[in-house]
Image: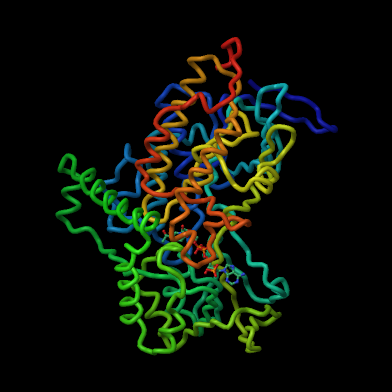
Amino acid sequence: TTVQYNLYGVTMTTNDVQIAIIGAGFSGLGAAIKLTQNGFDDYVVLDRGEDFGGTWRDNTYPGAACDVPSRLYSFSFAQNPDWSRTYSHQPEIHRYINSVAAEHDIASKTRFRTEVLSARWQEDLGRWVLTIEHAGERSELRAEFLLGAVGPLCEPNLPDIKGIDSFQGEIIHSARWDDDYDFAGKRVAVIGTGASAIQLVPKLAKVAGRLDVYQRTAPWIVPRTERPYTAAEKWAAKKVPGYQSAVRGSIYAGNEFVAFGLTYSPKALKPVELLCRANIRKGIGDPELRRKATPTFQVGCKRILRSNDWYPALDRRNVDLVTDGIDHVGEAGIVSRDGTQRDVDVIVVATGFHVTDSPVFEKIIGVDGRSMAGVWSEIGMQGYKGSFINGFPNMMLMIGPSTGLGHTSMVYMIESQLNYLVDYLKTVRAQRITRTEVKLDSQRQYNNGIQHDLRNSVWVNGGCASWYKDANGNITTLWPGFTFNFRRATKKFDIGAYDVVRGNGTSV
Ligand code: N01
């Protein structure tokens, strides 16, 4: 239904839907497909971008690719026989996501170029009220249920470095790439040595006149076993029933074994460390550069990266690995702590994302007018089964707290949450429930369990700082251990963990 009214002289349009989904990446798209398949047709997907893909649409830097094997990096219900390589690159993943969306006609339910400015729970209405903006026009959308599917890697983190605003050249974030900028012959600085930087640096090094890489913490990197699929593998993926599932299953099982090393027995990761050290020796000839490129924390504490061309890139004559730390940025370039000034034309900031402090959390306002950011600033970033949060009725978060992974495909976690979402909505429909809010006690107990399971993990004890930790130093982003345990935990909506209000049944 659509209602128009006047607010301070501006005509506002209010639309009502049963479910509003924010985000058209893997999570939002998967949710839309599952909702349709289960008879929940009254939903809308909102996304500020131009098409489907989320983080795989936005990260177009040179060399952007996935470090999860292709066969595992797809929806289980839409496996892709057409992957061209063992690890897929951004354009292919972006195409895959859009082809799945087209197959299920999700575009007809999606409003692109639509920014959600705020989402506010209105108790008297029993609705979420979203203020949205499209083509400069603001309107309201009211929804019984809200699904936050923006993903943890959506808000680029611009480093807070003294003087950076005074820089007269270009500044480009890895997640907001400027395809028109010509790096040929330019003096380039890259800040950061995470998953994004190790992919883009080798590409830029080939064209830049000079490239300074500013490293705060050296990452552990295993070789990348990427290759094109052979003709026989491509044929099998298309023609042999069960082939893709079997390959997928074996990769999944191998990855789960790594989870054991990460969470329960970090010493089991020793062979991985030896592999990383061999990778450094193979890629770098100069002993001093090898020393600078060797991490000083335990392998696995930060994400283990995959590359064959990062170390050779650092070893190039036009590349400098700067480890003295950045003191400030001036009009012409970067001054490191030892006082050296390196003038550059462009600074690439590969400094990651606001994960535990995303601006999105300011925009979601729950019970008593409290924002998610406000609630989490007191109790830490936590939720129940990574999905529901006390104080935010009728709202579920995809890839919420404690669902991230250091070892396998996030699509598996997303599909687990989608099972939970569908069972939740079916329960609500069958029992004529109008309001659900996870109990604070359930949430506390659940999170105590997570922190208990994490206590021996390498993420806690590995001696590193990482985006896995929140401002209090707690690991609030990662799922500890095996992902099949999360699948089991999200199989059925466990209504006992929630406060529920039943209505007259007309709303659901
Ligand atoms: O970001 P990051 P990312 N001064 O946060 C440094 C996924 N991903 O975009 O380590 C100087 O990992 C920071 O230094 P330090 C994947 O989940 C996947 O690379 O904090 N340096 C670090 O080196 C990944 O984990 C793929 O000391 C500063 C870097 O910037 C996640 O995205 C590809 C700084 C940030 O690394 C994020 O990866 C790409 C400062 N002020 C991304 N602030 C694949 O699948 C930050 N840094 C392959």
Provide residue 145's location: percent of width, then percent of height: 58, 28
Q: Is residue 243 visible?
A: yes
Depth check: 446 or 301 in front? 446
Q: Is residue 278 above or below residue 437?
A: below
Left or right: 184, with 379 as reference point: left
Residue at image point 57% right, 44% down: 382
Residue at image point 52% right, 78% down: 213
Depth check: 437 or 31 in front? 437
Q: Is residue 134 above or below residue 195?
A: above
Provide residue 9's location: percent of width, then percent of height: 84, 32
Provide residue 221's location: percent of width, then percent of height: 38, 70
Q: Which quarter of the rendering shows the C terminus?
A: top right
Q: Which residue lies furthest to the top in this view?
A: 504
- Colour logic: rainbow
Residue at image point 39% right, 33% down: 104
Depth check: 365 or 493 in front? 493
Q: Which quarter of the rendering shows the N terminus?
A: top right
Q: Is residue 39 above or below residue 345?
A: above
Left or right: 222, with 442 as reference point: left
Provide residue 66's location: percent of width, then percent of height: 39, 58
In this figure, what is the number of numbered marks?
0
